[in-house]
Amino acid sequence: MDIDYIKNILKYDQSTGFFVWKVSPSRSVKMGEQAGTIDGKGYVRICIKGVSNKAHRLAWAVVYGELPAMAIDHINRVPSDNRILNLRLATCSQNVVNSKIRANNTSGIRGVSWDKKYNKWKVQIAGKHIGYFNSLTESKQMYTKVRLEKYKEFA
């Protein structure tokens, strides 16, 4: 991907996270219009030369001059919020740890679920088993402790 080309056709506003077309990329899109559409997972995608690009990766490239090999994580977990202050480089594990609570989560606490077999709360982080606990409070404390120690971030 040619970052200079991107800068020539798109204007990125770091404070809003929006891209605007500097040129008219097609008959149906006018210069000055906001670029991109939101996909089924909530990410903004911008089509350039027939290739769909995630806007957060384009934002990173425009601001820092390169596309990193690592994942780019939305700190606030809102995939359409592409303000540069909301984006950070992350390992795959960090990105998973910072994901939203799953829809089938019954505890209301990320990484904590009830294990019927053991009749205890089970704690996992980034797919790794941490342990079983009698109370929900103890489970949340352990999850938070491991997340801080291993991933240097809060729950």
Image (cartoon, grey):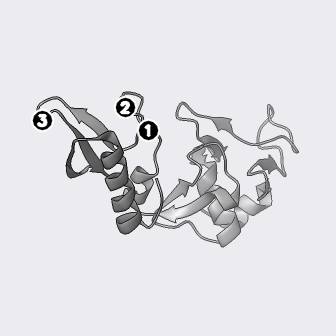
Q: Secondary structure at mark 2?
A: loop
Residue positioned 58% across, 44% down in the render: 52
Instruction: Estimate the x, y position of residue 53 in percent, counting from the top left.
Output: 59, 48
Q: Secondary structure at mark 1?
A: loop
| Residue 124 falls left or right of residue 92 | left
Q: What amino acid type is highlighted by mark number 3? A: Tyr
Characterize the local packing of mark 1: few (<14), some (14-19) or many (20 or more) Cα atoms within 10 angstroms.
Answer: some
Residue, disc 1: 101
Circle on res. 118:
3
| Residue 89 falls left or right of residue 138 | right
Residue positioned 77% across, 43% down in the render: 25
Instruction: Estimate the x, y position of residue 42 in percent, counting from the top left.
Output: 58, 36
State how far apart marks 3 and 1 are (Cα): 23 Å
| Residue 71 falls left or right of residue 149 | right
State how far apart marks 2 and 1 are (Cα): 7 Å
Residue, disc 2: 105
